[in-house]
Amino acid sequence: MSTSLNPQAVTYAKRLIRDGKIKNDEGHWGQHNPDSSDENAFLEKHKIEEYGNWHLGLDMSKGEDTKGRYKFPYGDFKTVHRDGLIAAKERAAQQGYHDIEKAADELLHLLEAQAQVK
């Protein structure tokens, strides 16, 4: 498997959650997941590494400077979404990426705990 956990994204997500940049939404991730035009707009103003911070998976078979390298998005480039973490966890489990599944689950618990503090 060429996709592995992106530890930099996990660290970034933890910081965002600690800072309260969360959406404890219960909708469907498809309603919040940035589309291709949102991704391109983000990349016009930010480096690809910053784009990568919003994805829990790295596909090492893809080029370093490509969007395709980054898998399992969890936020909208502003906040960590509960439904994004759930979607990443479920897809990672289905595809056998247990390290990504575990990381998404841990982040989900952190987000839910932070949401109760607010």
Image (tube, grey):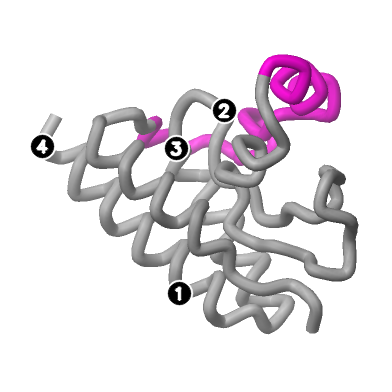
> For the residue marked with disc 1, what is the amino acid?
Lys
Q: Residue 48 appears in which quarter of the rendering?
A: top right
Check disc 4 and report the residue beneath it: 117
x 47%, y 62%: residue: 104
Magenta span has 41?
A: yes
Foreground disc of the pair 2, 4: 2
User: Alpha-carbon distance for marks 2 and 4?
Assistant: 23 Å
Q: Residue 50 appears in which quarter of the rendering?
A: top right
Magenta span has 106?
A: no
Q: Tell me which label, 1 or 3, sits earlier in the chain.
A: 3
Q: Count neighbours of disc 4 (C-alpha within 10 A) and say few if under 14, some if 14 to 19, many if 20 or more.
A: few
Q: Tell me which label, 1 or 2, sits earlier in the chain.
A: 2
x 33%, y 49%: residue: 14
| Mark 3 element type | strand
Q: Magenta residues?
A: 23-45
Q: Count neighbours of disc 1 (C-alpha within 10 A) and say few if under 14, some if 14 to 19, many if 20 or more.
A: some
Rendered-image quadrant of the N terminus? bottom right
In this view, which residue lies farthest toward the left? 117
> For the residue marked with disc 2, what is the amino acid?
Phe
Relative depth, front residue between 49 and 22: 49
Q: Position of residue 73 (x, y in %)?
A: 63, 47
Q: Count neighbours of disc 3 (C-alpha within 10 A) and say few if under 14, some if 14 to 19, many if 20 or more.
A: many
Q: Tell me which label, 1 or 4, sits earlier in the chain.
A: 1
Q: Position of residue 24 (x, y in %)?
A: 36, 36
Relative depth, front residue between 92 and 50: 50
| Mark 1 element type | helix
Q: Tell me which label, 2 or 4, sits earlier in the chain.
A: 2
Check disc 1 and report the residue beneath it: 102
| Mark 4 element type | helix
